[in-house]
Amino acid sequence: MITPFNDEYFMKQALQEAQRAFEIGEVPVGAVVVCKDQVIARAHNLTEQLTDVTAHAEMQAITAASNFLGGKYLKDCTLYVTLEPCTMCGGALYWSQIGKVVYAAKDEKRGAGKHTGMYHPKTVVESGVLEVECADILKLFFSMKRN
């Protein structure tokens, strides 16, 4: 059976969340958590709105997905996020035991990938899906902030 749901489809959902963040003046990072081809959580950065440095898109998505499933482990889920998770989010993803993480743009300065063993040993990590589109919205946001 051919399904329209693939990594690009779900990353576009995450990019829509990043756009929502952009529109409210947040760093435009968006995330969705998918289980069995169904989006069970959507989130974007809310650090400014909530005055909370931990309110990253991934943290919001993990909480929402856990609430949806009624448990803290996300073993059968995939997180799609527009920017590589930071070490804080990587640690939370480790504890959630998420099955897969797919991110678009690499975070050269703060990305969790700079550290070995950041994710749970069973977590599959993939990158580069819609990388250009997701990097572009971040570049636009920060260029507007500088001007």
Image (tube, rainbow, N blue to C red):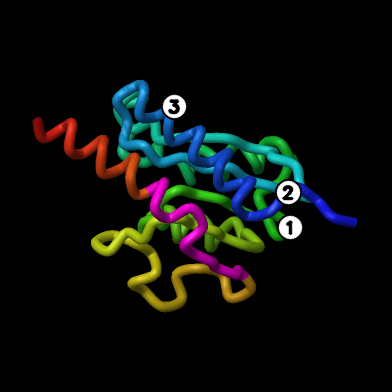
**Where is residue 7, by image quadrant?**
bottom right
* Residue that badge 2 annotates: 5
Magenta-highlighted residues? 123-134
Side of 64 relative to 27 (left or right)? right
- Give the crowd class for mark 2: few <14, some 14-19, many >=20 residues within 10 Å: few
Of the residues under marks 3 and 2, which one precedes in the sequence?
2
Q: CA distance from mark 3 to mark 1?
A: 27 Å
Element on which disc 3 rests:
helix
Report whether residue 87 is seen.
no
> What label sits on residue 20 in the rendered view?
3
Tag in front: 3 or 2:
2
Residue beneath the point at 75% across and 42% down: 38
| Rendered view: 89 above or below 62 | below
**Residue type indicated by callout 2:** Phe
Which quarter of the rendered picture does the C terminus lie within?
A: top left
* Residue that badge 1 annotates: 76
Tag in front: 3 or 1:
3
